[in-house]
């Protein structure tokens, strides 16, 4: 899915836009025991409850593609005859009305998950009339197809202690009993994906709130597919590839130039309004290093190392390589934060055998909020 297709589906999670009839779910305690199951019709909810429930489900589609949202790809064999894919299809095709499949799915999630405390598993099924548009922008009268999908959200349930609340109608404080509060999803997914504005049963779109912890056990237990490398680990691995292959050429100027080149790519892609996400292949990154003046032999070594660590045809998102909005220099005792647009103010130098980080400071220098003079 690209950003445009993702936005199209996310717009469904408004009370007047979707065809979600109910929210199915179960409440699980810390011992991984189901303490309640439910099927809450949306028709019985008031507007505030409806909006909050839809907002929770929509959170399973939040974050960036390649960071919080990861592509789960099923093999041809899985689609043909695997238990895990058959279960997902049964849930989708029955619009969650197949009670036996729903209960099997709850069990599979509970067996696969590692969360502290109580949690809830929420499921919502939607059917979307996908309309096409003519060249003049007019919507066709009949929809091109009916896109059926479901959303799963796994949400921590946190206890709220008993206390007092102010009743504005009575103008007095009243007691409130202890109860539980549903939190935003920690994990979730959409199946199938909406690729080229049609159903792709070979993929699911997986959500993780914490990009450093993508819950490998959940992916393996529910999808039985290879686990994508977390964005935080991709960044660390990329930095390791640079350091190990560039060696003494891995200096400030090279890293500054790499940051600058990728930042410019991001800006150009944004300006182009291309809906396909920007990705960086091995070839692209080798080209960046060549532009930065890195020795050709070391560029080839980087390519080999990249392929070993990420795979032959892997493409990374820019955020998995650099943070274009942040530029820092760190020593064991000092951290220097630099405006990414003014990286030119910093340089490195060796004076009398001592290594220094030099910062050009013409004006506006403060120490703990107090302006100082530099003579």
Image (cartoon, grey):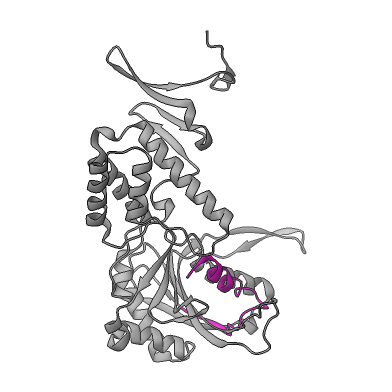
Specify whether 240 is left or right of 206: left
One can see residue 305 in this view: yes
Residue 112, how many percent across, how many down?
31, 72
Q: Nearer the viewer, residue 289 or 7?
A: 289
Does the magenta portion include 19? yes
Determine which quarter of the picture holds residue 166. bottom right
User: On screen, 193 above or below 217?
Assistant: below
Specify whether 47 is left or right of 70: right
Specify whether 22 is left or right of 355: right
Q: Nearer the viewer, residue 353 or 136?
A: 136
Please report the residue visible at 55 percent of the width from the left and 54 percent of the height from the top.
270
Determine which quarter of the picture holds residue 174. bottom right
Does the magenta portion include 349? no
Q: What residue range appears in magenta?
A: 1-25
Specify whether 133 is left or right of 155: right
Residue 125, how many percent across, how many down?
52, 82
Determine which quarter of the picture holds residue 130. bottom right
Residue 169, how many percent across, how many down?
77, 64
Which residue is most to the top?
Answer: 375
Please report the residue visible at 41 percent of the width from the left and 74 percent of the height from the top.
204
Residue 155, how many percent across, how many down?
46, 67
């Amino acid at each position: 899915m690209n950003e445009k297709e993702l936005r199209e589906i996310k717009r469904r999670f408004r009370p007047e836009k979707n065809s979600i009839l109910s929210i199915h779910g179960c409440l699980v305690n810390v011992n991984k025991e189901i303490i309640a199951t439910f099927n809450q019709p949306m028709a019985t909810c008031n507007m505030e409850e409806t909006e909050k429930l839809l907002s929770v489900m929509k959170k399973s589609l939040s974050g960036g593609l390649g960071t919080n949202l990861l592509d789960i790809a099923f093999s041809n064999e899985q689609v043909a005859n695997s238990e895990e894919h058959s279960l997902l299809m049964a849930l989708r095709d029955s619009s969650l009305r197949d009670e036996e499949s729903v209960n099997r799915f709850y069990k599979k999630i509970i067996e696969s998950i590692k969360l502290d405390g109580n949690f809830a598993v929420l499921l919502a099924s939607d059917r979307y009339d996908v309309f096409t548009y003519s060249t003049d922008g007019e919507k066709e009268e009949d929809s091109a197809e009916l896109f059926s999908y479901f959303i799963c959200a796994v949400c921590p349930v946190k206890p709220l202690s008993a206390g007092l609340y102010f009743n504005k109608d009575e103008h007095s404080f009243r007691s409130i009993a202890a109860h539980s509060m549903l939190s935003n999803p920690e994990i979730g997914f959409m199946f199938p994906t909406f690729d080229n504005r049609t159903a792709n049963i070979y993929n699911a779109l997986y959500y993780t709130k914490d990009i450093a912890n993508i819950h490998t056990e959940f992916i393996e237990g529910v999808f039985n597919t290879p686990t994508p490398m977390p964005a935080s680990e991709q960044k660390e691995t990329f930095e390791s590839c640079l350091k190990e292959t560039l060696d003494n050429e891995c200096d400030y100027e090279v890293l500054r130039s790499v940051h600058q080149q990728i930042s410019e790519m991001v800006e150009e892609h944004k300006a182009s309004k291309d809906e396909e996400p920007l990705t960086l292949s091995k070839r692209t990154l080798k080209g960046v290093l060549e532009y930065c003046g890195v020795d050709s032999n070391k560029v080839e070594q980087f390519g080999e190392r990249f392929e070993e660590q990420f795979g032959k045809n892997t493409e990374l998102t820019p955020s998995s390589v650099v943070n274009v909005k942040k530029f820092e220099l760190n020593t064991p005792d000092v951290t220097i934060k630099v405006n990414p647009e003014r990286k030119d103010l910093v340089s490195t130098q060796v004076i009398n055998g001592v290594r220094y980080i030099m910062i050009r400071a013409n004006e506006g220098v403060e120490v703990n909020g107090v302006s100082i003079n530099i003579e």
